[in-house]
Structure formats: C-alpha cells, structure tokens
Amino acid sequence: MAEQSTLQITGWNVWYGGFHALRNITASIPASQITAIVGPSGCGKSTLLRSLNRLVELEEGARVQGEVLLNGQNIYAPEADVTEIRTRIGLLAQKPFPLPMSIFDNVAYGPRLHGLHRGHLADVVEQRLRQVHLWDEVKDRLKRPAARLSVGQQQRLCLARALAVDPDLLLADESTSALDPHSARAVEDLLEELKNEYTIVIVTHNLGQAERLADYVLFLWLGELIEVGPAERVFGQPTHDLTRSYLERRFG
Amino acid sequence: MAIPLNRTLVVRAPRRNTLLFALRRLADLLLQNGMTILVGLVISLLGVMAVVLLLRALPVLVQQPLEALLASSVWHPSRGEFGFLPFLAGSGFVSLLAMTLAVPLALLSAIYLAEYSRLRQMIKPMIDLFASIPSVIYGLWGVLFVVPFIRDTLIPLVDRVFGPNAPLLATANTTGYSLLAGSIVVGIMVFPIIVSVTDELFRSVPQGMREAALALGATRWEVVKTVVLRRTRNGIVAAVVLGFSRAVGETLAVLMVVGNVAQVPRSIFDAAYPLPALIANNYGEMMSIPLYDSALMLASLLLLGVIAAFNLGAQIVLWRVTHAEAAT
C-alpha cells in the first residue's frame, strides 16, 4: 500500500486565456488525511484539484505556473511523464463516468494498461469491488455493461476503478453531488475508510460534508487561498473575515 | 422597491371574450394540423415515387422475372435483353473501392479533428465546404487529373511491376476512364461526409469519460482506442453506410470518369457502368425501343430502394448513438 504521500503546492497560478483562475497558491496537503477544498462557486476549487493530476492542462487556453510536488517530485517538471503521474493519482469525478465496457473491464482497465498479468486481473477486480462494498451487488453480472448500474453503484465502481491502479493520492471532485443521499453517504463512508491508506483531497460545496469528512481545510475565494488549517480550527475559529462570513451564511 | 398599486390605473386583461378564444383555438388547431399534414405529404412523396417507379417498371418485370433480370449480364435493349448485372456490379465495385480508399483516411482525419487538433473550428467548416462543392466540379477534376494520371502513370507502372496478366489489375482499357477513376472521385466526395459525421460522433463522447481514462494512466491514443472508438463503433458503421449510400447514388461525377461500358469489370482499370450513370445517360433517348423505358424505371427503383434503406438504417443508428446517454 501507499507510503505516506506528501503533496506540496508552491506559487501555483492558473490562467484560462486572460482569466487568472488561481493566484499564487501555496499549501501543503497532509498525508493520510482528508483535505477538503471549500469556497463559493467559481472560486477555483475544481481548477486546483485538476491541477493536482494535470487534467487542468487539457482545457483550451489554460496556462500554469508554479510547482506541485508529489513525494518531492515536481509533477509539472518537463521530464515528468504525465501518464505515469496520473497513474499515481486516482480521480473520482462529479458524475460517475463508467467507461463503455463491462463492470469487470472497468475495474481492470488501469491494471490492463499497465501490463498486469491476465491471471491476476480477476483477483484485482474482486479485491477492489469488495473494497468499495460493490462485490456482492455485482458479482453475478460482471460481464454486463457498467452503464446499466445505478448512479450510486456507478460512482462506487469508479472508485474501485481508481483504486485498482493503486494510486498514492485520491482526488474527489464533488463526487457525491450527483448522488441520492443514501449513495452519497455510502461514498462518504468509503472515503473515510480509505483515508488511512491514501492521501485524499476532496472538493465540496456541501459544508456539512466538509465538516464530517475533512481533517484539513483549504478555503479559496476568487482564486486566492484565504485560509488553511486543521478542520476543527478553520471551522471552529476561522481567523479570516471572509472564511467566517462564508461559514456563517450556511448557518444563518 | 415595490410600487404601490394605483387601482385607477390598473387595466385588467379581458377574461371572457369567448369568440376571441374560439378563434385563437381554431387558428392553433388549423396551423398544427396543417403543418402535420404538410410534413406528412413531403414524407409520403418517397412512397409516391416508389409506387410510380414500380408501376412503370411493371412491363419489364412481367416479361422477365426480377431474378433473371438481376442475374443476366447481357444488356441489349434493341433485342429486348435487359441484364442488370453489369450495372449492379459497376455500382457495387465503384462504391466499395471508393469506401476502401475513403474510410481509413476519413476516420483518421475525424479522430485528429475531434481529439487532437486545436484548429478544429477552422478546419471543420472547410471540410463541410468540400461536401457542398457541386459534383460536376469533382467530375471535371477527375477528367482533368485522375483519368490522365491513371492512363499515363498508374497503368504503365502496374503493367511493368505486375505484368500483363495480374488479376484485378490487367486490362485492355488504356483510356484511364475506369472503375478506379470513378472510385477515386467518389471516394473524395464521400470523404468529407464521413469526416463530418464521425467527428460529431466523437464529440458526443462526454469529456468526463476521456478524463476518467486519462486519470487511470491511459495515453491519448489509448483513450481514443478504448473509449472514443469503442463507444461510437455502431455510429461509425452507420457513418460508413451513409457514405456508401452517397457513393452508390452519386451520378454525374462518376459517369464523367468511369467509362460507361456495360460489362462486369474484371480489373480496377476496366471501364464500369454504375446504375445512376445508366439512367442519366439513357433516359429520354431511344425511347422507341420497347420496354427500354420500363427497364430504366426498374433501375431507378432499385437505386431508390437501396439508398433509402441504407440511409434510413444509418440515420436511426446514428441518432441512437448520439442520443443515448447510457449507451455502451
């Protein structure tokens, strides 16, 4: 399993064309904890998350500056292999996107790409589906298209698929917002279970969820990092006025 | 800021003008039904065309059964012999060879456009422009460039390399007006259609699905192969069928370069004679020959049937692929 993975963001800027989406972000993400990026819509939460596995550079007109160090290695270094980097970072998107293939092939997708021996595939698939508590629900229909599963099941399948490449870091971009409350809770519980083995970063609009899950919080406002710290401290005694008013609006 | 309502200024809309209501309802009803009927008429035009063609084709069908007409390769109208095989073979071979040339290039171009190119917005309209160039221009280009190229370069080259008896290549026809010339011209004509349709297909694959595969460590080509092509494979088949039906129906550009000899071609350099060329070249001439007119009507009916079936099937599949969110 993953060793203690560290993530350090230094002087991080992102532009979309002329729009300066993230301004000089510097933060370090603690290992084996859940870090929540919170803030109002359009403040750059998703951009920051997508910076961590280099998906941000797929946007048209996107430009980046700064460093993101994963276990001490700058993932934006010119010699860095983007495919290899993404393999070390799992992504759970806002909506589940099952690949157009069977349930089995979805989980086996990453291991197959990376040359896992055919004989081990079934074991990996079963192990990962058990890890997300999906095995008992799908074990009789592994060859059926993944798109036939319910949305909640699909999201757990996507988590199993991400875990199957054995990443160091797990990113979740509002991963429960498209789910019914029951499925959302199931995914939350899974993230909670997984945080001992993985460093997890989530983006969420749901402050209740952030409070339930997060050990560490980054509060963003209009592309700037306003406040950073352990969750109890940021939620309990925010030092910055913007953080306080953002948190209070929820209660009042 | 709320403006206090001044009772004296309020003009209330009339509520119970029943006559006006009735008139409005009538207008709505008439328009709605009228438009439905008009659309129905346009669609039923296809059926009317088929019925008229069938009626006019009956005389030749009464004289000889359809199977015999389709299987015979003797086309001798003045002797009352109407064998359609050369034309069916001509249409089939020209279209198949055209697709063989066009499909791989078109698919790769569409993949490039949809998945790699940053200039898609500039290139796509140009490709669509190619689809709207009148076919006579493609035909002229074929006569001016393709035919001489085949005659002066390709045939001598093939003759030197493969010898005078190579199957599918050897020919007595040295004019350059040939099956291959027709296929190249038609291939170039269907290329933009296939690119355009498959590019739309590829764009209909959700970006999140690509990102999911990328996040698992797939390369861009692996994303294309395992996600984009896989999800759209039915649609790709449909796009190819759509292109094929265009190729089968293309008339003018083909008849300008294909040689128009009523024979079953044995070589890609032989002259061929596709169905649409037969109809366009002969209808209205030599109509004194009995049953000639009827035979051409049968040719038209065959063409209409094949193209309508292919087109409709392809459109249905395409619609399903681009609209089914849960399609796998």
Image (cartoon, coloured by chain):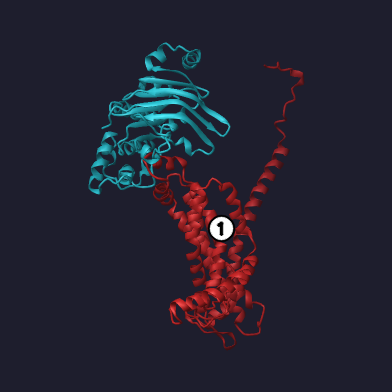
The image quarter containing residue A162 is top left
Q: Where the N terminus of chain B falls, by quadrant?
A: top right
For the residue pair B130 and A211, the one nearer the viewer reads as B130
Q: Position of residue B222 (x, y in %)?
A: 39, 48
Q: Is residue B298 visible?
A: no
Tell which residue pokes out farthest to the front in this image: A79
**Up/down of A240 relative to B67, above or below:** above
Tell which residue pokes out farthest to the right in this image: B8
As shown in the figure, which amino acid type bears the numbered disc 1?
A: Pro
The residue under label 1 is B192
Seen at 32% across and 25% down, the residue is A31
Tell me if B158 is positioned left or right of B25 in this view. Answer: left
Q: Chain of mark 1?
A: B
Q: Is label 1 in a helix, a strand or a loop?
A: helix
Q: Position of residue B266 (x, y in %)?
A: 47, 79
How many numbered discs sit on the rendered protein?
Answer: 1
For the residue pair B73 and A26, the one nearer the viewer reads as A26
Q: Is residue B112 visible?
A: yes
Tell me if B54 is positioned left or right of A138 in this view. Answer: right
Tell which residue pokes out farthest to the bottom in this image: B79
Q: Position of residue A170 (x, y in %)?
A: 35, 31
**Up/down of B129 relative to A188, above or below:** below
Instruction: Give neighbour class at mark 1: few <14, some 14-19, many 20+ (Cα, 10 Å).
Output: many
Q: Position of residue B20 (x, y in %)?
A: 73, 38
Tell me if B127 is positioned left or right of A208 in this view. Answer: right
**Up/down of A141 relative to A95, above or below:** below
The image quarter containing residue A122 is top left
Q: Colour of chain A?
A: cyan
Provide the letter of the chain coloured red: B
